[in-house]
Amino acid sequence: MTRGSYESLSLCFEPSLHWGAMMIASYIVATGLCKFGFGLTGLKLQRLAGFVGMWPFFVCMVYYAHVGTYDIFFNGAEARTYDSSAASERFAFIYISSNIVAAMGQLQTESHPLLTQLMAHHVLSLFCFGAGFYFDRFRFWMAFAGCCEVTNLFLVPVFAAKEMPHFKKQAWYKVNGVCLYITFITHRFVLFPIWLYVWFKDQAELNLTDMHWVETYTFAGTIAALLLLSVVWFVQIHRTTMNAFFPGTYKKSD
């Protein structure tokens, strides 16, 4: 059985701290912009500043996840298992940092049961990514799964509109809704099944005998769970998008 090492895990510490510091700085700047630009205070200010401050890093994550996936995807099962690239590593560092920083903010702004769900997501994400570094393999699969983060680019305006309802009346908000709808299909309903198919195909081809139970069950299990959750989330996205173009299609009670 593969043992892994703390030395391998520690490789993500310093780069993640670096990105985390930039995220906190971005949040401070966003707080000032939202406070003096929109006159917000309290939880509204904290939440909107969090969305605005993190958005540039979501762009970075999406870019590096796609580049990191392209770098290795077509190189065969062994490469997908053991190789990594600068882009996929950078994606992992940003993703780890974003989960930590987001958790710090949500502990101040959210309450149960949403807070419990968010914290469970962050803990599971950090556990899976930490395992990738600890066992020093399967890091390509982080970038491949991370391509789904493209939906966050369009979810941020949706969450921001909850704090600034007048956004919903603007034309760009409808365009944003369509982009969210499409990327949910392409980067979740299409991507996750492909991820699972290639993952199990690679395992059958390589027939690894030193798989830890974390690698055997947690990685694929997380993707399968995300696929199921995405179906649940898409119901609300579908209803919201339809109501934006055809008001009254779905009632709030639905």
Image: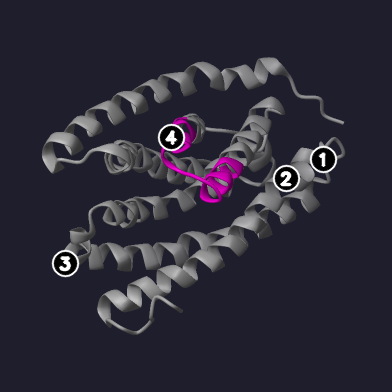
Q: Which residue is labeled 4 in the image? A: 108
Front-most of 140 and 36?
36
Q: Secondary structure at mark 3?
A: helix
Dot 4 lies on which element? helix
Q: Which is in the foreground here, disc 2 or disc 3?
A: 3
Q: Where residue 49 sits in the image (x, y, percent)?
A: 28, 38
Residue highlighted by disc 1: 213
The circle drawn on residue 171 is 3
Report the mark closest to the observer, 4 or 1. 4
Which residues fall within the magenta stretch? 101-121
Residue 82: % across, % down: 67, 34
Q: Name the chief secondary structure element in magenta.
A: helix
Please, what is the three-letter code of the amino acid marked with disc 4?
Gln
Image side of residue 228 versus residue 235, left or right: right
* First in sequence: mark 3 vs mark 1: 3
The reply to whether the C-beta atoms of the residues labelled 1 and 2 are less than 8 Å apart is yes
Circle 2 residue? 218
Q: Earlier in the sequence, mark 1 or mark 2?
A: 1
Please determine whether, in this image, residue 104 is positioned above or below residue 17. below
| Image quadrant in which the N terminus is located | top right
Q: Amino acid at mark 2?
A: Thr
- The answer for how far apart the CA atoms under marks 4 and 1 are is 35 Å
Q: Is residue 190 visible?
A: no
Residue occupying the point 80% across, 53% down? 204
Residue at the image position 23 percent from the left and 28 percent from the top? 29
Amino acid of disc 3: Ala
Residue 24, quarter of the rendered image: top left
Q: Is residue 249 left or right of residue 92?
A: left
